[in-house]
């Protein structure tokens, strides 16, 4: 018989979530974090300062997101991890190096640990574009949290069904 697996968005009450946030461009990343909190809270996850469901780790920049995500995933305490960063193109190739390594590293953490890691790193040409994606027009932090809810519940559903 064919099995169909899908994640849900209806109830986050049984998920453990970690969010790793880059301080660099924190004008943008703090807005993304607020969008994440809003979505998670509206879907039943406790986002209070004494939450047992949610932890937040701050790192210097997007380049450091994979290492801390990997450390958190290896604890096996989290069903899903969300990474938040903002890499804005400048006049040098630094943008290309940072985003390439951050994206490869974050993808690698998911594959190596089996813990879903949501790629919530904005890559824009200007600060204005980043701010638009972090709340002026819409807040992609909300979308990243929805992806986390879906992936967290999907992986939990597959794990439960496999046993």
Image (cartoon, grey):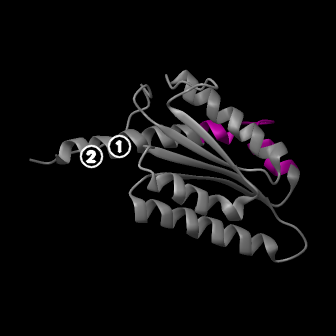
In the rendered image, residue 141 lying in the magenta stretch gets the answer: yes
Residue depicted at 56% across the width and 62% down the height: 106
| Front position in the image: 83 or 144 | 83
Q: Which residues are magenta?
A: 128-143
Answer with left or right where residue 73 lies relative to residue 135: left
Answer with left or right where residue 157 lies relative to residue 81: left
Residue depicted at 42% across the width and 43% down the height: 79
Residue depicted at 78% across the width and 50% down the height: 23
Residue 131, image x and y in percent?
82, 44
SS of the residue under disc 1: helix
Determine which quarter of the picture holds residue 33: top right
Q: Say if mark 1 contacts mark 2, CB within 8 Å.
A: yes
Residue depicted at 60% across the width and 44% down the height: 19
Residue 1, image x and y in percent?
8, 47
Residue 113, image x and y in percent?
41, 60
User: Callout 2 environment at 10 Å: few (<14), some (14 to 19), or many (20+)?
Assistant: some
In the rendered image, residue 59 lying in the magenta stretch gets the answer: no
Question: On residue 158, which mark appears?
Answer: 2
Q: How many numbered markers are drawn?
A: 2
| Front position in the image: 62 or 88 | 62
Answer with left or right where residue 112 lies relative to residue 25: left
Magenta region, mostly helix, strand or loop?
helix
Residue under pointer 1: 154
């Amino acid at each position: 018989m064919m099995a169909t697996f899908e994640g849900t968005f209806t109830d986050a009450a049984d998920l453990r979530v970690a969010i790793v946030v880059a301080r660099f461009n924190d004008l943008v990343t703090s807005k993304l974090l607020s969008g994440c909190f809003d979505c998670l809270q509206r879907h039943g996850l406790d986002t209070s300062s004494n939450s047992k469901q949610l932890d937040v780790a701050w790192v210097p920049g997007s380049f450091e997101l994979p290492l801390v995500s990997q450390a958190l995933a290896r604890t096996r305490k989290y069903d899903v991890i969300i990474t938040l960063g903002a890499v804005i193109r400048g006049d040098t190739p630094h943008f290309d190096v940072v985003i390439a390594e951050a994206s490869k590293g974050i993808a690698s953490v998911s594959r190596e640990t089996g813990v879903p890691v949501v790629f919530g790193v904005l890559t824009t040409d200007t600060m204005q574009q980043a701010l638009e994606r972090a709340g002026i027009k819409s807040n992609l932090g909300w979308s990243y949290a929805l992806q986390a809810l879906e992936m967290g519940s999907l992986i939990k559903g597959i794990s439960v069904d496999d046993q």
